[in-house]
């Protein structure tokens, strides 16, 4: 009854409203602050406990005066302490908001810095690649060989990463380095001999023999990852050399060639290979750009689990941008002459770029990395920039070499 007597005293002396900070079976457990308003409505002893913000009312009647101490324990505090508590909470809230604001500002600065780097290095790479394509010959081939060597190094580093080695045995490091050098020589041999089928077969046989004769237990995973590296990083890029340098027939209808300076090769410099390479490169850039913008704007449906950020909406917008670019450039260069051929060429470029992008994304996902490297600031590794071009060269060359002559357009 001692617990109840304290409430009687509260009502008898008409104390000011108190602040209840604990209402549970354990006096040391805190609940939210509620204002306690004792009121006496009749001459009889009758207390009503009303908590602001709640409709619950506890009544104590004189006929049944009984309080369970385990049910109600009231701890009264003065109002200045409640003010101090609210001030302390405000200070805590401010302390929690300030670091968040600072982190958001630093993150915004980091994103803007990355965007500037991406634009600057992207323009630099674009101008350099455009110059190499226009120059052709050994300039284009050596530049391609350098990119192939760096891309092969990144590929074999991905193969040796933890994510992939957890399920397989990677090839020895010396084999990876030898394969990178072999891949770099493939474009040069393609320009010199025109065909490297025998060279690629011989290189694959030598590498396979080295793997089989190594100490320890040779693994099939070593052989398969090495052979795919030779094909993916070395053989496929050679089709760009075949397209740019091998198709030397002049594009006679190209108006730009008529005004091309004689010191730079004159009209004969504008070959079918040069025009096809420029259209293909431009279409791939347009496909990537429009797919990115379309995915950001209206992308909702994931394209594949390999790359969750890619969407069907972005792919459709990218396809439209790629075909539109191919058609516009075909009118400018007057090649190909048929509208259907220009549309088909744009479709093949888009398909090859998406397939190459997804293939590299699959390799990176198995490796457990976001970028293939950090060679290019703001862009990642060399494979991150050329993945869309790896398979496209073979499709573009086959289209120009086989399909166009077959249909006479």
Image (cartoon, helix red, strand yellow):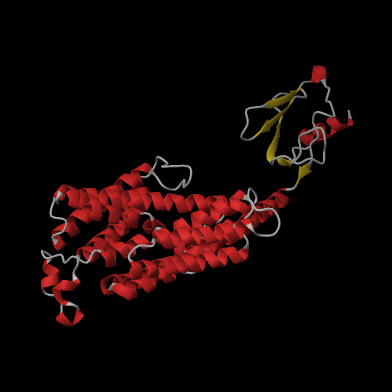
Q: Is residue 40 left or right of residue 183?
A: right
Q: Is residue 238 left or right of residue 363?
A: left
Q: Nearer the viewer, residue 319 or 57?
A: 319
Q: How many marks?
A: 0
The residue lying at 49 percent from left, 62 percent from top is 203
The residue lying at 43 percent from left, 71 percent from top is 146
Give the quadrant of residue 92: bottom right
Q: Nearer the viewer, residue 232 or 306?
A: 232
Q: Is residue 35 visible?
A: yes
User: Is residue 122 positioned above or below 297 on the image?
Assistant: below
Q: Nearer the viewer, residue 254 or 85?
A: 254
The N terminus lies in quadrant: top right
Q: Residue furthest right?
A: 2
Q: Is residue 378 visible?
A: no
Residue 134 in the image: state x and y as whole percent.
26, 72
User: Is residue 326 positioned above or below 132 on the image?
Assistant: above
Residue 184 in the image: state x and y as whole percent.
45, 68
Q: Nearer the viewer, residue 298 or 52?
A: 298
User: Is residue 188 positioned above or below 89 on the image?
Assistant: below
Residue 317 in the image: state x and y as whole percent.
30, 47
Give the quadrant of residue 234: bottom left
Residue 49 in the image: state x and y as whole percent.
71, 30
User: Is residue 323 positioned above or below 131 on the image?
Assistant: above
Q: Is residue 390 left or right of residue 344?
A: right
Q: Residue furthest bottom?
A: 263
Q: Is residue 264 left or right of residue 298?
A: left
């Amino acid at each position: 009854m001692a617990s109840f007597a304290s409430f009687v005293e509260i009502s008898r002396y008409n104390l000011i409203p108190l602040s209840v900070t604990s209402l549970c079976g354990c006096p040391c457990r805190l609940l939210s602050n509620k204002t306690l308003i004792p009121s006496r409505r009749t001459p009889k002893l009758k207390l009503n406990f009303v908590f602001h913000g709640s409709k619950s009312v506890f009544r104590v009647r004189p006929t049944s005066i009984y309080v369970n101490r385990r049910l109600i324990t009231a701890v009264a505090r003065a109002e200045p302490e409640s003010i101090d508590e609210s001030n302390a909470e405000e200070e805590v809230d401010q302390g929690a908001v300030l670091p968040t604001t600072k982190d958001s500002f630093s993150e915004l600065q980091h994103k803007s810095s990355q965007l500037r780097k991406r634009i600057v290095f992207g323009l630099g790479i674009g101008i350099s690649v455009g110059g190499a394509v226009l120059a052709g010959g050994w300039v284009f081939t050596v530049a391609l060989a350098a990119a192939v060597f760096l891309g092969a190094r990144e590929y074999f580093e991905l193969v040796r990463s933890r994510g992939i080695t957890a399920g397989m045995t990677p090839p020895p490091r010396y084999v990876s380095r030898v394969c990178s050098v072999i891949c770099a020589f493939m474009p040069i041999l393609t320009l010199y001999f025109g065909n490297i089928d025998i060279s690629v077969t011989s290189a694959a046989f030598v590498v396979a023999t080295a793997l089989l004769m190594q100490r320890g237990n040779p693994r099939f995973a070593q052989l398969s990852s090495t052979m795919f590296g030779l094909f993916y990083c070395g053989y496929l890029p050679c089709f760009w050399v075949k397209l740019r340098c091998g198709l030397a027939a002049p594009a006679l209808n190209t108006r730009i060639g008529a005004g091309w300076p004689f010191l730079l090769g004159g009209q004969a410099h504008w070959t079918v290979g040069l025009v096809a390479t420029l259209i293909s490169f431009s279409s791939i850039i347009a496909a990537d750009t429009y797919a990115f913008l379309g995915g950001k704007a209206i992308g909702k449906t994931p394209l594949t689990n390999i790359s969750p950020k890619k969407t069907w909406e972005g792919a459709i917008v990218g396809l439209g941008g790629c075909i539109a670019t191919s058609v516009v450039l075909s009118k400018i260069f007057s090649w190909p002459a048929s509208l259907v051929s220009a549309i088909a060429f744009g479709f093949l470029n888009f398909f090859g770029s998406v397939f190459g992008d997804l293939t590299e994304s699959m390799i990176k996902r198995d490796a457990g990395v976001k970028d293939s490297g950090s060679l290019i600031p703001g862009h990642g590794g060399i494979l991150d920039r050329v993945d869309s071009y790896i398979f496209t060269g073979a499709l573009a060359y086959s289209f120009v070499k086989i399909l166009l002559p077959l249909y006479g357009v």
